[in-house]
Amino acid sequence: MLPDAAAEAGGGNVNALLVAQGISSVAVGGASHRYFAALVVDDSVAGFMAAKVEDDVFVGRRVAREVFSYLRPSVRTQQSRGTLLDALEAWAKSNKADVVEYLVVGDESVDNGMPAAAERGYARAAIVLAKTVRS
């Protein structure tokens, strides 16, 4: 599943091994500030979410930040996304986070997590501007 996630997120231009190392740096080690959850559907792993919690010195609060999540196309439903978000929130609360940040890529026209997040009280908190500088 990880090669599929890396290829989709990076448009086929990423190294799946480096992605695996990046995710494992968040998910492995047993530290309480790291989080990794798998979504299991019909006895098969169908998706996952990685996150970390940290003290943000600029805003003076403890923030749980989703680092990366992926769902297989066959389970990309708001229910599946909501299940991962609910688990993330429970973990964030247990780690005394003040806020959870969930990154949504794309806009309302894209199949993303906006509806599931909005249903749970999430609101737009920032706008990220991006520009490709290397082709």
Image (cartoon, rainbow, N blue to C red):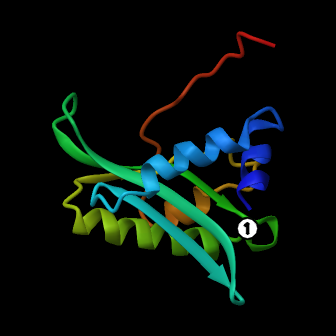
Disc 1 target residue: 76
Q: Callout 1: few (<14), some (14-19), or many (20+) C-alpha neighbours within 10 Å?
A: some
Q: Amino acid at mark 1?
A: Arg
Residue pictured at 79% horizontal, 46% vertical: 8
Report the quarter where the N terminus lies.
Answer: bottom right
Residue pictured at 73% horizontal, 67% vertical: 76
Q: Position of residue 99 (x, y in %)?
A: 29, 52
Whether residue 123 is visible: no
Q: Is residue 65 left or right of residue 83?
A: left
Residue nearest the observer in this picture, 61 or 13: 13
Whether residue 96 is visible: yes
Find the residue positioned furthest to the left: 60
Query: Where 60 sits versus 87, above or below?
Result: above
Q: Is residue 120 left or right of residue 68?
A: left
Q: Is residue 35 left or right of residue 92?
A: right
Q: Secondary structure at mark 1?
A: loop
Residue nearest the observer in this picture, 66 or 44: 44
Q: Position of residue 51 (x, y in %)?
A: 43, 53
Find the residue positioned furthest to the bottom: 42
Q: Position of residue 61 (x, y in %)?
A: 19, 43
Q: Tally the numbered discs.
A: 1
Q: Position of residue 7 (x, y in %)?
A: 79, 45
Find the residue positioned furthest to the top: 133
Report the quarter where the C terminus lies.
Answer: top right
Residue pictured at 74% horizontal, 35% vertical: 14
Query: Where 121 sits versus 78, above or below?
Result: above
Residue pictured at 23% horizontal, 69% vertical: 94
Query: Where 108 sits versus 36, above or below?
Result: above
- What is the quadrant of residue 129 in the picture? top right
